[in-house]
Image (cartoon, coloured by chain):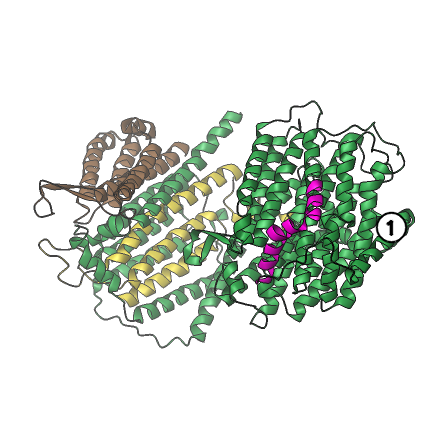
Amino acid sequence: MAEHSDPNAPWKTLSGIGTTAITAALFLFFLQYLPTVAAGEPVRWVIPWIPSLDVHLSFWIDGLSLMFALLITGIGALVMLYAAKYLAGHPQYDRFALYLFAFMLSMLGVVLADNLIALFVFWELTTFTSYLLIGFGHADPKSRRNALQALLLTATGGLALLAGFILMGVTQGSFEMSQINAAGSLVGKEFYTLILFLVLAGAFTKSAQVPFHFWLPNAMAAPTPVSAYLHSATMVKAGVYLLARTHPALSGSDLWIWILSIFGAVTAVFASLMALRQTDLKQTLAYTTLMALGTLVMFLAGSTGYAITAAMTFLLVHSLYKAGLFLTIGVIDHATGTRDANLLGGLKKAMPITAMAAAVAGLAMAGIPPFLGFIAKEVAYSGALEMHLWLFVVPMALIAFALMFAVAGIVAYKPFYGPQGELPHAPHEGPWPMLLGPVVLGVLGLLFGLMPGIAAHYLIEPAVHAVMGAPDRGGRVKLWAGFNMALLLSLVTFALGFLIYLRHQSLRERLARIEAKSPDLDASWDRFLDWFVRFSKVQTGLIQTGVLRQYMFATFTVFAVTVLVTLVARGAGPLRVSFSGLGIMEWGIAALITAGTVLVLMTSSRITALVGLGTVGIGVALVFITYSAPDVAITQLLVELLVVVLLALALLKMPYLDKGNVQKHSFPNAVLAIAVGALTTWVLLLVVDQPFDRRLTEFFEGASWTQAFGRNIVNVILVDFRTLDTFGEIAVVLIAALGAFVLLKGMRATKEEKK
Amino acid sequence: METLAALIIGVLTAASVYLMLARTFMRFLFGLILLSNAVNLTIFASGRMTKGHPALVPYGADAPLVAVGNALPQALVLTAIVIGFGLLAFALALAFETFRRTGTIETDELRFAEPKEDTQQ
Amino acid sequence: MNSIIFTAGARILVALVFVFSLFMLLRGHHLPGGGFIGGLLGAVAFIIYSLASGPEETRRALRVSPEVIAILGLGIALLAGLVSFFMGDPFFTGQWYWVGGDSYETAAFSINSVLVFDIGVYLVVLGGILSLTFAFEEET
């Protein structure tokens, strides 16, 4: 496969080792918070960002975020090391390392951010970086299409999430998640239903719940390390994280319980059936990830200690074994050149270490004692039995876990211990950087299972505390919980799972037949996009005619109608028209300006039009000089002079003003123009009729000399009181000048060069 | 004077709107020039108009002794005039370059961004 | 424009208008004038010159290209703002240094950032407008 490395290529590159080292250092950094957080003391850092909008870069480390942070950095470091070898010699490996590292940091941001807006920004950053990672093989159109699909779906969910966050922040009076949770439940408050739906839209798209699930299996177009990292251990869990994070504020309502239970359970069962149906091991794992996400959502529906403990334990164990299995599949693919479950078999001899790592991860996945996976399943059954909808949840969990048992056999047992298969090339053991990850993750799953107290005390119970918003009684995570209903259900699961494993070939064929008949959401997505493109084309054709005059007409009409409606609706009073105190000077100026205007309007001669424009300019300057504005008047006169010079230079090179030198007048245009002019006069008369607020003027008059040592108040305002404004304005003058310069000369220069 | 100014501004605005609806972009530019005059006068008139007393502090005084013209709108208009000139010059350069390349000044014929076949479905 | 009278007269006129533009710039803080008006007048001076002798000749007379003058002006204006920043005041607060005294009444003259800023405005307006005009003149 194209994504594979040259085994002899150097892999200890700066980008590979560097990113791995930094990520490992971050892991150690977060490790030091374990005792503090386990003691129930969250850590908080705040950096003000946009204080006026109550947006801060605040970080919050409690049990939940710490567990996620450790998973992200720990698995991240292992995956980066793995990827360095996996993609060694790939021409774009450095780019890959950058994307992966950027993703790692964004994901850390998501789980550590306390401010909702910051959380949202990080959330979208993970969307973008995952887009880049899924589309890493950008030469393949399918890869690009799948990346775009993931981006559109999760980013749309992200926008809904932003709306939900804003409503949540406004309702609770704070944008800090810790304060929102501390302020108590939102259930029953205004907008609760809307907030819930918006947040769920974000979480369900990100965590690929049915019916938004189809992007996740497609995202497997990414290189295997990406699938291991993003699409099993971290990013897809962001939705689950969000549900856990908002659990204290949003959970508890019937709506929450029903939606999460049903969507979670349906996703879990549907995904585990689909996992059985796949033959590509990577696709199988993708669907089991979906199953895990569904299970997690289902347990977050509950609010009891057992349900939440089940969710957190399962989250931890799933991240460990799933990342391990994905990496193992990568090693197999690397060594044999195939991922087809039907071809693989008997790899144990050639790849003993890989086989061991896969076995350990597979046993955890199947939930066999003494692995942590077993404990997770026990707690899960106990939790399911306590839930409101237990009659629904327990059977669904049973089916999902039994299928999981069977799939674990297909993925982790059969390729190594099953009958010898036909392989594209002879297998060999993977290199150590690619084995370290699966081995470490597998061993951790075993260690946590043997010593559940440590995992419970440092990771699971603090996380449960954070999700529930109050300390749980603890002690639920243990290897031997006695003979109870959960154990019985576990035994049923094993029996059922074993049966499914034995019959999985025929089941797969039956599932394939059902799948062929059922609607294909993936294809519907393509149809939807096609339809959307057609719709926007039609819409553009209707609205955007491409004729400037029509745009201007529409703009001025909207302006006129809006002003008119506002004036009438507000009941604009009678106008006070006063021509008192006006001498011959004023009437003369008015006549001059009007005459100039009429000249410009009526003439078809360019020179006459220039004269008209100049007349208007001088008339306006006369207004300024008569009414106490000498500075403005001088500026106006000088600019008028320059306008005439520039127009004369440019205008005389143009052919004509009107085609055939006959001006075509338009009655509708004239009506609209007169309407806009009359409305402007009306509004202005209303404005000058209002009492005038002279506070600013008085300040400038009083402070001009005493504070700024200038007697020309206009100039003092320009260069002292409002300097920043003036600075911006001269910058605009410069930009306009350079822009025109480039337009006239720069483009000409490049054109000549091309010749 | 504000009443008369409002009338002048109305005339200028109406003329500029009419010019901006014309078929050639030279007339459009004339409309732009008249519009910027109208806008400057609007800002000036909204700050009220005082005859014959520029906003200066006489020597030996800490503040103007009589009611002088409102300085703030004057400062705003002053920069607006210069910026308006920059805008006009840029628009003129754009128009000139457009004519040089396409040989037309008819806005209806300038359809490179939105060709006819795209908009007529 | 090939008029000998205009060409000869323009040289004197340019010098007069240019000096007048500097005068308007400097008196601007107390009387009508300032950077905008001064810059416009300065531009008018050189435009007269270029109408008489052509833009090439005017560029030579200017020595520095108008684009550089404008950019330099913006830099000077920014510098005037940064001074106050380094003095611990908010950006663009006017800074005054009295020479030969300690207040406006006693000092012989003052060095202040406000005038520096106005000079920046002058240069931007002068350079910007000349750059525009030359571009039109040379291309048409």
- How many marks on residues? 1
Report the side of A50 relative to A101 (left or right): left
Residue A149 seen anywhere in this rendered image of the structure: no
Q: Circle 1: is it few (<14), some (14-19), or many (20+) Cα within 10 Å?
A: some
Along the line of sight, the residue nearer the viewer: C79 or A395: A395
Instruction: Report the quarter where the N terminus of chain B lies.
Output: bottom left
Residue C68 visible, this orientation:
yes
Examine the residues drawn in magenta and state their main secondary structure.
helix
The foreground one among A713 and A263 is A263
Task: Let me know if residue A459 is in the magenta part.
Answer: yes
Decide if residue A87 is on the left or right side of residue A506: left
Protein chain holding label 1: A
The percent position of residue A459, horizontal first and vertical second, equals: 61, 51
Residue A706 in magenta stretch: no
Badge 1 marks a residue whose secondary structure is helix
The segment highlighted magenta reads A442-471
The picture quadrant where one finds residue C63 is: top left
Relative height, residue A173 to residue A337 (above, below): below
Task: Identify the amino acid type marked 1.
Answer: Phe
- Above or below residue A344? Residue A375 is below
Which chain is represented by brown in the image? C
Q: Which residue is mark 1?
A: A498
* B89, C138: nearer the viewer: B89
Q: Position of residue C123 (x, y in %)?
A: 28, 38
Q: Colour of chain B?
A: yellow
Chain drawn green in the picture: A
Does residue A58 appear to the left or right of C119 in the view shown? right
Compared with A724, C111 (above or below) is above
**Image location (x, y in percent) of residue A713:** 20, 54
| Image x and y of residue C52, in percent | 28, 32
